[in-house]
Image (spheres, rainbow, N blue to C red):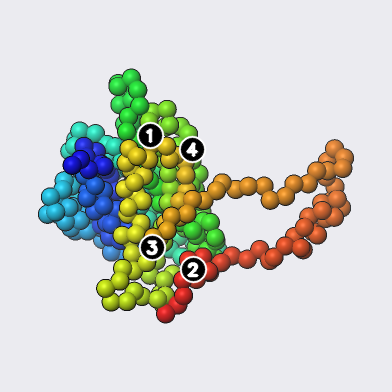
Amino acid sequence: MALPLDGLTAVVTGAGRGLGRAEALELARLGAAVVVNDFGAPGRDGSGDASAAPAQRVAAEITAAGGRAVAHTGDVADHEQARELVELAVSSYGKLDILVNNAGILRDRMIFSMTEDEWDSVIRVHLKGHFNTTHFAAAHWRARSKAAGGPVHGRIVNTSSEAFLAGAAGQPNYAAAKGGIVGLTTSTALALAKYGVTANAICPRARTRMTEDVFAGFAEPGEGQLDPLAPEHVAPLVGYLASPAAAGVNGQLLVVHGGMVAIAERPRIAAKFDSAKDAFSYAELDGLLTPYYADRPPNETFGAAEVLGLKRG
């Protein structure tokens, strides 16, 4: 019986641990050949010496289960190394069909304390890393589509975060990068649709090295129960979005965790005011907007417990 991703090749970045690992294993289970990318630095802030071990372990795990995989240990935030990653997929398996962007780091700090390097490094790995791989994958699919004279199978799954949706006081760099990834995704979706390529973004909730602080103290699963925040809850959605079945899903943002998928709407207008004359005056705006916001609940962001619907254990 044919598997949903038989004959397809996937690149998964940040796939040596956590979410990326679970996604790489799921894509392989569904039949894809997988290029497992991970820079391998031990610190979640990107610190420490790079190591080939995490990517190689996951690639070996896939091949031991009967799948096909190769490891790539380059830095996707480096433009040239991102090009080499896409080229490795093509040289190893003939083409690239699926790109899952997952690589990232954390350097949390309040906005008034954050250094320039803490800002630049997080934007570089998350946002530029997503751009770099998408750029080379898009060029590959455009060339293939032109040669074929029609659409090809191309799927991009980008990783955003509810830090962008709900706010994260100590993560201005991370929240900005994740918001930028949504903008990159929707733009890419529009640009590549005519080639048969879709681009979607997910906001995963998962207990990983990146989120160990966020979920510290939250209820752990009982014996024999799957953690509702296990990365394995996220991976099936990635597998679906990578498949031919998801051809009609494009430019979407989906929140996923523990048996739930929520489709986020694009921002909608909550209220509209028109000026009495050609242009607003300060007094007119004060008379319209001040009462409007006074009658609404305080504009507060939600902590992890409220956003996730979880209870501390």
Amino acid type, label 1: Val
The quarter of the rendered structure image containing the C terminus is: bottom left
Q: Nearer the viewer, residue 47 or 69?
A: 69
Mark in front: 1 vs 3:
3
Quadrant in which residue 18 is drawn: bottom left
Give me the disc on residue 309. Answer: 2
Give me the disc on residue 197. Answer: 1
Crowdedness near tag 2: few (<14), some (14–19) or many (≥20) residues, C-alpha within 10 Å:
few
Q: Residue at x 54, y 60 (%)?
A: 166
**Do the residues under discs 2 and 4 have CB atoms within 8 angstroms?**
no
Task: Give the alpha-carbon distance from disc 4 to disc 1, as whole Å.
Answer: 12 Å
Q: Nearer the viewer, residue 161 or 108?
A: 161
Crowdedness near tag 1: few (<14), some (14–19) or many (≥20) residues, C-alpha within 10 Å:
many
Badge 4 marks a residue whose secondary structure is: helix
The quarter of the rendered structure image containing the N terminus is: top left
Q: Is residue 135 above or below residue 211?
A: above
Task: Give the alpha-carbon distance from disc 3 to disc 2, as whole Å.
Answer: 11 Å
Task: Give the alpha-carbon distance from disc 1 to disc 3, as whole Å.
Answer: 28 Å
Task: Give the alpha-carbon distance from disc 2 to disc 4, as whole Å.
Answer: 31 Å
Badge 3 marks a residue whose secondary structure is: loop
Give me the disc on residue 258. Answer: 3
Amino acid type, label 3: Gly
**Do the residues under discs 3 and 2 have CB atoms within 8 angstroms?**
no
Whichever of callouts 2 and 4 sits on the residue coming sooner in the sequence is 4
Task: Give the alpha-carbon distance from disc 2 to disc 1, as whole Å.
Answer: 34 Å
Task: Give the alpha-carbon distance from disc 4 to disc 3, as whole Å.
Answer: 29 Å
**Left or right: where does residue 156 sit relative to residue 310?**
left
